[in-house]
Amino acid sequence: MAEKSVMVVGVDDSDLSYYALEWALEHFFKEPLQSPFELVIVHAQPLASTAIGVAVGPGAIEVLPHIEHDLKKISARVSQKAKEICEAKSVNDVSLEVADGDARNVLCEAVEKHHASVLVVGSHGYGAIKRAVLGSVSDYCAHHAHCNVMIVKKPKAKH
């Protein structure tokens, strides 16, 4: 039997990333045993020091353990929800990973580590100004990941 290609799906704690995961499962894992992909779900856990930003001073060091604890709780919740989404679609053969760092770098490193042929990420749909200020994970990955990148956009509700 031929070895399966690897698909990495990036998730964060947003409905848009969960939608991208569901979309990938519906389109590539309808028949999980027949899917041409091995699935790896990756969540990037921000470093506590970046979560507090430029806050410096005597209180900043004392807050770090609390922030780290909260970030770990969020990562556990994201992983659990991703697992539940997979189970609901009868996809049980999945690897879940949490890696510390900026999502852009974490996802590109996961692609390299797993020799992935596809990276799936959700689109937050930021405009040019927000994208310039906040940065776009999907845009960065589209330019830097050494594989095909699928950016999944959630359809806008029709009025």
Image (cartoon, rainbow, N blue to C red):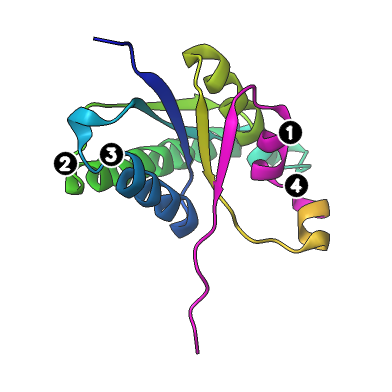
Residue 75 screen position, x and y as percent:
41, 38
Give the alpha-carbon distance from disc 3 to disc 2, as whole Å: 9 Å
Q: Earlier in the sequence, mark 4 or mark 3?
A: 3
Q: 40 or 31: which is nearer to us? A: 31
Please give left or right for residue 64 compared with residue 91 in the image: right
Vertical placement of residue 56 versus 152, above or below: above
Residue 52 is a magenta residue: no
Instruction: Tell me the residue that label 4 is attached to.
Output: 135
Quarter of the rendering occupied by the N terminus: top left
In the rendered structure, which segment of residues is drawn in magenta? 133-159
Between marks 1 and 3 in the image, the one whose residue lies nearer the viewer = 3
In primary-sequence order, the first of circles 4 and 1 is 4
Per the model, the C-alpha gap separating discs 1 and 2 is 33 Å
Residue at 71% across / 28% down in the picture? 144
Q: Nearer the viewer, mark 3 or mark 2?
A: 3
| Residue at which label 3 appears | 29
> Dot 1, crowdedness within 10 Å: few (<14), some or many (≥20)?
few
For image coordinates 58% across by 31% down, the residue present is 148
Q: Earlier in the sequence, mark 1 or mark 2?
A: 2
Distance, label 4 to label 3, CA atoms, is: 30 Å
What residue type is disc 4 on? Gly
Residue type indicated by callout 3: Phe
Name the amino acid, label 2.
Answer: Ser
- The CA span between labels 4 and 1 is 13 Å
Q: Which mark is residue 143?
A: 1
Q: Secondary structure at mark 2?
A: loop
- The quarter of the displayed image where residue 48 is located: top right
Chain-order first, disc 4 or disc 2: 2
Q: Which mark is residue 90?
A: 2
